[in-house]
Image: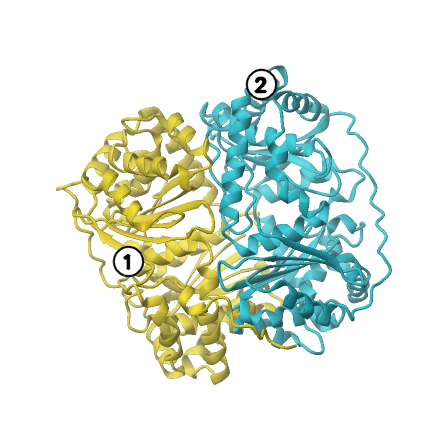
């Protein structure tokens, strides 16, 4: 693993640099500690909408210029809003990275949020939500998540509720922007073909003059323990039934998180850690064998996210056309019981670790992926979390996995969601 | 901001694949192997294609080529389904096949230490699949479910309706996965017969990129696939010409209870070997790709706020794939979006692109090339592209000059060749 430079500028901006000289490319990521987790009813979706507005221009880089500037240089850029964070990235030919640095430093404070642009983006975002609503699994996922979080702001989808998308105003967005887009609430991660000392000089020049702001307060309300199993049904178009079973899971920094990853890998297959490439198949996972090979389901998937507060572990099943959701849930429960009753063989855990090792190797081909993880892991833990990932997995024992199955996979800790097609 | 003063660590052009670092070999049975080493990561990617696809399918058994491709990994003479996936997944490797129209593609990856297993499995699944009855039936249910899900997908259904208009009486109007009736009609014997007759080494292309010496890898491939022969292997059927539309044709597919409509507007575009392909590709970027999705994105998304996703694409390959504009819009805004897109297509074929648009897009095409070739998978795909379209091993080194040579007049000429605003196919799927 190449050496990392990590330091905090005088205004509180955390900077992480990693030199990778395999390709003439630099990937530049600017992260803000804000996402749907920081939102309250009435303003759901405001973090994601703010992200869209960051592409609408500053006095120095008007929208029409901004759209073309990166592309003209052969770069690729985009942004993602998550429950815990928002990130903006540019992956560019190494000799053009100055543009990304200038542009991100500029739009940390100078975005215009013009009322006209806010109005046209409102309908674009509503269109984005409508596109998701066309998908049965979005409709089901939204209801399951809402049922799982009665109190915590993980209750709502990142895109936000339609009612709020219709009513949020320009000043709400601008206030959100100015509150959270400050250097002491941000992380800059840069990976690729550069000299760290030179890069740091350029970063200081552009970012250090930006004054720090008042540290935003977060009023996140912890979710109380769930007192019993919750069930939701969603009816919608189609012929196919789906089941989503979501259990409250540990946060990324709780000791149970890594054993949980192993448990999920055994049940639904290895997680894909690589944001720009596909993962591997899951046809030897316990649930594939118990549900797909037994022709109860035609596909299974699942995963657990790395988040600041405890979020959900989800198992998603596409029900076989000749079977019912209840039959599938019954067979799934049998598999969970098997794991609760008997610790998994040590070889099965070793296999999950080897799979993760291979997936790590695939991810190391991509400079963008390296830049991503350096910053992302700082959002919910520190970069060590990512660097020690494989080591931590390797310490997981069969007894750990059994205990987790007994603790987290109890019915009382889950929401069972069923999508029922209206034929 | 001062630009980097020290000399660049890499010369961007020389980092691109070229004749000096691609090894190309043809095995005696016709398989072409392209290899490029990359020891920066301990992994290896394989990618390739065989000259077998849905063009071979009879109408009543449409989907046979695709079904066969999906069934290859369901069991071989040496390994059953469980063993195949145990061997793969236990080491974090992957392998998969995908039946297309002209070709059947395959792709896989592994740690370099597991490459022998991956190649042995590739050879077995290609040469000795046994299509176990139980697995065939299980797979059939999965395919039928996928087809049922597809009928609910507004984007897929708009695209299918679009192909029905543009490629009427042409094989491109047929869905390579078939439909429920034809998939039900396919028997296990059909799969066995199809594999026996159509799968063979002639015309097969394969690329390997990663932590392995090219000479070593070619030897390994020769060992597992070098003695593969099939005297029955048919020649790919030639494509009939696409008949141009004589007027604009609109088709609407109703999918009740959906929240958004998808629309596809366009015509048949150039095939990859057409002399004006690169001009059309660069023009397409100006029309609906560059920055926030080009001119179309500017009008439909940025100015009118009508759509989150709206862009144009050019998908010609071995044959004349579509040149189209896709958008997802509120059902109430479909007509307005169609009019805006038609007006942009009309402008695009009426006047040349501006000098600024041309240089911006040329610069984008040239600059982004190293990004697309960053990973082993990207390089493998590029090597297949070189071979499939006979572009030459020096293509990526020549590419900047080829792009810089394109003129606004050539783009206009290419646009006029394929896009006619008064003769478009318009397909809409939604509530």
Residue A208 placement (x, y as % from top left): 76, 68
User: Residue extending furthest top?
Assistant: A341
Q: Is residue B188 visible?
A: yes
Q: Quadrant of the N terminus of chain B?
A: bottom right
Q: Chain of mark 2?
A: A
Q: Colour of chain A?
A: cyan
Return the residue nearer the eye: B338 or A311.
A311
Secondary structure at badge 1 equals helix
Q: Residues within 10 Å of mark 2 (few under 14, many from 20)?
A: few
Chain in yellow on the image: B
Residue A166 placement (x, y as % from top left): 73, 59
Secondary structure at badge 2 equals helix
Return the residue nearer the eye: A321 or A35.
A35
Q: Residue at x 53, y 43 (%)?
A: A360
Which residue is labeled 1 in the image? B388
Report the mark closest to the observer, 2 or 1. 1
* Cα distance between the residues tagged 2 and 1: 50 Å
Q: Please, is residue B150 above or below residue A116 in the view?
A: above
Question: In the image, which disc is placed on residue A381?
Answer: none
């Amino acid at each position: 693993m190449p050496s990392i430079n990590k330091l905090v500028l005088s205004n509180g901006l955390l900077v992480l640099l990693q030199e990778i000289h395999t390709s003439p490319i630099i990937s530049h990521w600017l992260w803000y500690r804000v996402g749907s987790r920081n939102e309250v009813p009435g303003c759901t979706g405001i973090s994601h909408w703010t992200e869209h507005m960051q592409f609408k221009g500053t006095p120095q880089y008007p929208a029409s210029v901004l759209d073309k500037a990166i592309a003209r240089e052969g770069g690729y850029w985009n942004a993602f809003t998550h429950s815990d964070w928002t990130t903006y990235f540019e992956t560019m030919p190494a000799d053009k990275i100055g543009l990304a640095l200038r542009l991100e430093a500029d739009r940390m404070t100078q975005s215009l949020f013009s009322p006209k642009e806010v109005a046209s983006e409102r309908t674009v975002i509503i269109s984005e939500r409508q596109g998701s609503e066309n998908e049965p699994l979005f409709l089901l996922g939204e209801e399951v998540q809402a049922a799982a979080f009665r109190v915590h702001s993980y209750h709502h989808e990142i895109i936000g509720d339609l009612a709020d998308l219709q009513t949020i105003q320009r000043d709400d967005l601008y206030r959100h922007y100015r509150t959270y887009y400050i250097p002491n609430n941000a992380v800059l991660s840069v990976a690729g073909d550069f000299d760290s000392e030179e890069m740091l000089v350029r970063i200081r020049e552009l970012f250090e003059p930006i004054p720090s702001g008042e540290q935003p307060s977060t009023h996140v309300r912890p979710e109380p323990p769930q007192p019993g199993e919750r069930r939701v049904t969603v009816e919608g178009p189609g012929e196919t039934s789906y089941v989503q079973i979501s259990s409250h899971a540990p946060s990324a920094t709780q000791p149970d998180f890594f054993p949980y990853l192993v448990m999920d890998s055994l049940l639904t297959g290895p997680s894909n850690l690589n944001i720009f490439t596909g993962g591997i198949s899951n046809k030897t996972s316990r649930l594939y064998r118990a549900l797909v090979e037994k022709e109860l389901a035609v596909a299974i998937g699942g995963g657990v996210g790395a988040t600041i507060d405890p979020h959900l572990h989800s198992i998603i099943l596409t029900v076989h056309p000749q079977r019912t959701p209840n039959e599938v849930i019954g067979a799934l429960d049998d598999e969970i019981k098997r794991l609760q009753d008997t610790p998994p063989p040590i070889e099965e855990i070793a296999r999950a670790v080897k799979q993760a090792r291979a997936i790590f190797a695939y991810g190391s081909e991509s400079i963008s992926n390296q830049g991503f993880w350096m910053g992302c892991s700082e959002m919910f833990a520190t970069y060590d979390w990512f660097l020690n990932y494989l080591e931590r997995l390797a310490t997981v024992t069969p007894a750990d996995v059994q205990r987790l199955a007994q603790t987290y996979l109890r019915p009382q800790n889950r929401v069972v969601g069923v999508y029922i097609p209206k034929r | 901001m001062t630009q980097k003063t020290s000399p660049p660590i890499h010369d961007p052009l020389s980092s691109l694949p070229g004749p000096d670092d691609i090894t190309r070999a043809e095995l005696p049975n016709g398989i072409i192997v392209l290899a490029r080493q990359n020891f920066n990561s301990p992994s290896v990617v394989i990618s390739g294609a065989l000259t077998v696809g849905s063009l071979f399918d009879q109408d009543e058994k449409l989907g046979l080529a695709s079904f066969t491709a999906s069934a290859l990994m369901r069991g071989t003479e040496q390994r059953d389904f469980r063993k195949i996936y145990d061997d793969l997944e236990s080491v974090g490797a992957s392998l998969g096949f995908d039946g297309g129209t002209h070709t059947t593609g395959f792709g896989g990856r592994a740690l370099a230490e597991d490459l022998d297993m991956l190649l042995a499995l590739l050879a077995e699944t290609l040469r000795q699949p046994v299509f176990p009855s139980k697995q065939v039936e299980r797979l059939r249910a999965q395919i039928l479910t996928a087809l049922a899900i597809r009928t609910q997908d507004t984007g897929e259904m708009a695209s299918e309706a679009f192909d029905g208009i543009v490629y009427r009486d042409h094989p491109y109007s047929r869905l390579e996965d078939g439909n429920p009736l034809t998939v039900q009609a396919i028997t296990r014997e059909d799969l066995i017969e199809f594999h026996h007759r159509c799968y063979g080494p002639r015309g097969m292309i394969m690329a390997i990129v990663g932590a392995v010496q090219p000479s070593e890898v070619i030897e390994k491939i020769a060992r597992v696939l070098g003695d593969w022969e099939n005297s029955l292997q048919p020649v790919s059927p030639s494509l009939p010409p696409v008949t141009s539309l004589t007027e604009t044709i609109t088709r609407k597919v109703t999918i009740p209870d959906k929240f958004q409509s998808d629309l596809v507007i366009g015509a048949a575009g150039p095939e990859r070997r057409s002399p004006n392909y690169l001009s059309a590709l660069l023009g397409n970027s100006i029309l609906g790709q560059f920055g926030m999705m080009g001119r179309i994105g500017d009008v439909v998304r940025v100015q009118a706020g009508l759509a989150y996703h709206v862009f144009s694409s050019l998908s010609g390959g071995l044959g004349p794939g579509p040149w189209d504009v896709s958008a997802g819009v509120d059902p109430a805004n479909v007509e307005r979006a169609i009019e805006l897109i038609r007006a942009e297509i009309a402008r695009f074929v009426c006047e040349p692109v501006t000098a600024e648009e041309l240089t911006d897009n040329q610069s984008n095409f040239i600059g982004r090339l190293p990004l697309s070739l960053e990973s082993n998978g990207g390089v493998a795909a590029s090597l297949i592209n070189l071979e499939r379209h006979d572009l030459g091993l020096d293509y990526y080194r020549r590419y900047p000059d080829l792009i810089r040579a394109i003129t606004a007049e050539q783009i206009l000429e290419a646009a006029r060749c394929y896009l006619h605003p008064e003769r478009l196919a318009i397909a809409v799927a939604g509530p």
